[in-house]
Image (cartoon, helix red, strand yellow):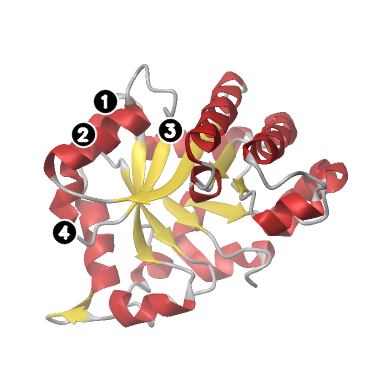
Amino acid sequence: MTSFLDRIHQVIADKSALCLGIDPSESELREWGLPNSAQGVLDFGLRCVDAAAETLGFIKPQVAFFERFGSQGLLALEQVLAEARAANLFVISDAKRGDIGSTMQGYSEAWFGDDSPLRSDALTVSGYLGPDSLDGMLEFASDVHGGLFVLCATSNPEAKQLQTAKHGNKTVARLVLEAARKSESKNLGLVVGATQNLEDFGIAQLREIDCKVAILAPGFGAQGAKLGEIEQIFGASAKNVIASMSRGITSLGPDKLREQINIAKDELWR
């Protein structure tokens, strides 16, 4: 069976490691001349999918920017995801879900169910209710060759307080990394911010050896990390990294979208 990591490697080989983040915030919609409404986020999302379909393999819609418009916003997200699937894009839905028991089962059915309009290839999740709380969703995702990206060392400044805390002699981030490495299906990946110092989080191991774990790396572009430094940042695990960029590509508006995608791809492989 093709593993989650194998699928990611194939997309990177066929297209690029660059992932277009779809973040239709109020300010982004304004810059694009779109209304701050469900129709606005739909138009934004569809234009991003159209541009990505030509040259990229990965997209990452930020679910919160669609949810803020209630049922109409979720309908817009469903339409964006449907177009992305039709274009054979690898969809990483950025929703950061995390719970236990039947609630987690509900999330599993929503994001990985065969007939669900929210069906995605991967989902960002929080493991702070305990790594084992993800097992049910991981099995559900694995059945459809999907996977999870669990928060490990995130790019926000507030992350250190919790993620560098220690249990015994290991940081929380290190425990998350070890849980991902132990995943027999290799369908559990990590979210590791490209702007963070791996040593501070106790996960310099990622740079030292190929940990054979998929890594979703936000923080490129507007947050300061440079695509050309991906190998310097992640070392031996760089080949497993999906480099996510949103505002760094979309901020110049829809007319510059394809041009900015190509510039980012060139920088990534320079």
Amino acid residing under circle 2: Glu
Q: Is residue 36 above or below residue 167?
A: above
Q: Residue at x 74, y 44 (%)?
A: 35
Dots 2, 1 in contact, CB < 8 A: yes
Q: Position of residue 32 (x, y in %)?
A: 80, 48
User: Mark 4 or 3 closer to N-term?
Assistant: 3
Q: Earlier in the sequence, mark 3 or mark 2?
A: 3
Q: Which residue is mark 2?
A: 139
Crowding near the residue tagged with mark 1, few <14, some 14–19, many ≥20 C-alpha atoms within 10 Å: few
Q: Give the distance between the C-alpha atoms of the residues marked 1 and 4, in whole angstroms.
A: 22 Å
C-alpha gap between disc 4 and disc 3: 23 Å
- For disc 3, the marked residue is 121
Secondary structure of the residue carrying tag 1 is helix
Instruction: Tell me the tag on residue 115.
Output: none
| Residues at marks 3 and 2, CA–CA distance in whole angstroms | 13 Å
Report the residue marked by disc 4.
130
**Image quadrant where one finds the N terminus:** top left
Q: Are marks 4 and 3 in contact (CB under 8 Å)?
A: no
SS at mark 3 in the image: loop
Residue 213 can be seen in this image: no
Mark 2 residue crowding within 10 angstroms, few (<14) / some (14–19) / many (20+): some
Q: Earlier in the sequence, mark 1 or mark 3?
A: 3
Instruction: Name the amino acid type tagged 4.
Output: Gly
